[in-house]
Image (cartoon, rainbow, N blue to C red):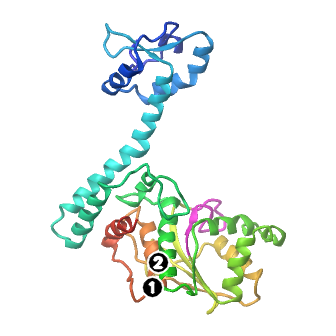
């Protein structure tokens, strides 16, 4: 029975009550040479394997050649599943990234991009992708950062890692800095607490860390900088959902102003989502009666559908370190991605 067929076949036809005769030391080399069954087949086998085992089956039938069916131990199904997951979630995206890096290395029109891409290429050759990220609060493996490179929309794992690098940079330059850099979970939690029509003071008091940050910003005049995901922050009141989009946010406690940017608008006047404004105002109200105005946070306008993350980060970094960092041009997003990779 071929495991590569797309036709629906009864699960029991894949299993045998006979024991696999192949020794483990011979089995692994053989598995490495044979094609992996398609994902749908492996998923079906894994779903049914426990029932098959209870029914007395001891092996799975693999027919890589029509006349040579092979019996493999049942655990091979789990091995296939793990391998397919790795190929889909790790190997495939990183292969695309390597192709992207290769294109940047071979560019003749942008010397700086070429140099950065070459350095990243050399760095990746010495990195263990299974190793945890060193020096970060998030210790997931390095391979989870694949969205940093290439033409990929950045997820919170990448955004938070970038913000953490910025936080360490600020603290190393000035341990008494007035800037507070927070990861994306800050606004997510504030939306949970203040996202309803009536802000809950009792619920707010359960989150001591939010109170500490609020006191530093609204009462002690510090400046909070973060990046916000608009998934739960619709642009219009009548809408229930927002969009997969990252925007920069700064709260200047000393000047009593909320600064908001949006790479979809660029230097034009971006409109802060009403729910975000409500959440920030409710948070402010817990600490001070001083009114806060809203101002534009200058942000480079993206010319694609995946660079909101790099430009949001660039905006925040340029605000905090204006003498060292400039706002990027739209075509420079690729260099920022490469430079962030080199910092890790």
**Is the C-beta separation of discs 2 and 1 under 8 Å?**
yes
- Number of marks present in the image shown: 2
The local crowd at label 2, few if under 14, some if 14 to 19, many if 20 or more residues have their Cα within 10 Å, is: few
x, y percentage for residue 333? 35, 69
Label 2 to label 1: alpha-carbon separation? 10 Å
As drawn, the residue found furthest toward the right would be 202
> Dot 1: what SS?
loop
Q: Nearer the viewer, residue 107 or 64?
A: 64
Q: Quadrant of residue 68?
A: top left
Residue sitting at x 54%, y 59%: 138
Which of labels 2 and 1 is toward the front?
A: 2
x, y percentage for residue 207? 75, 68
Is 99 situated above or below 247? above
What segment carries the magenta color? 226-242
Residue sitting at x 77%, y 69%: 197
- Quarter the C terminus occupies: bottom left
- Whether 287 is among the magenta residues is no
Circle 2 is placed at which residue position? Answer: 169
x, y percentage for residue 139? 53, 56
As drawn, the residue found furthest toward the left would be 108
Q: Which mark is residue 321?
A: 1
Apparent side of residue 286 relative to residue 69 in the rendered image (left or right): right
- Whether 232 is among the magenta residues is yes
């Amino acid at each position: 029975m071929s495991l590569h067929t797309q036709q629906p076949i009864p699960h029991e036809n894949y299993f045998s009550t006979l024991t696999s005769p192949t020794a483990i030391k011979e089995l692994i080399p053989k598995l490495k040479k044979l094609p992996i069954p398609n994902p749908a087949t492996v998923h079906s086998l894994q779903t049914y394997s426990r029932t098959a085992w209870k029914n007395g089956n001891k092996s799975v039938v693999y027919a890589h050649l029509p006349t040579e069916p092979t019996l493999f131990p049942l655990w091979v199904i789990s091995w296939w599943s793990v391998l397919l997951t790795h190929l889909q979630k790790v190997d495939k995206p990183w292969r695309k990234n390597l192709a992207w890096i290769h294109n940047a290395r071979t560019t003749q029109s942008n010397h700086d991009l070429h140099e950065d891409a070459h350095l990243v290429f050399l760095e990746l050759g010495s990195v263990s992708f299974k190793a945890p990220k060193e020096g970060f609060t998030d210790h997931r493996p390095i391979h989870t950062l694949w969205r940093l490179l290439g033409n990929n929309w950045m997820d919170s794992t990448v955004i938070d890692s970038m913000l953490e690098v910025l936080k360490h940079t600020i603290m190393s330059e000035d341990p008494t800095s007035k800037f507070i850099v927070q990861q994306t979970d800050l606004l997510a939690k504030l939306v949970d607490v203040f996202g309803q029509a009536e802000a809950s003071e009792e619920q707010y008091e359960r989150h001591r860390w939010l109170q500490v940050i609020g006191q530093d910003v609204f009462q002690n005049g510090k400046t909070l900088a973060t990046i916000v995901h608009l998934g739960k922050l619709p642009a219009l009141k009548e809408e229930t959902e927002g969009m997969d989009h990252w925007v920069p946010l700064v709260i200047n406690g000393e000047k009593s102003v909320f600064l908001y940017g949006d790479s979809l608008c660029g230097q034009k006047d971006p409109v802060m989502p009403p729910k975000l404004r409500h959440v920030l105002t409710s948070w402010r109200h817990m600490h001070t009666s001083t009114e806060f105005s809203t101002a534009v946070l200058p942000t480079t306008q993206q010319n694609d559908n995946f660079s909101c993350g790099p430009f949001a980060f660039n905006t925040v970094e340029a605000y905090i370190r204006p003498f060292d960092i400039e706002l990027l041009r739209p075509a420079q997003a690729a260099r920022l991605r490469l430079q962030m990779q080199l910092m890790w």
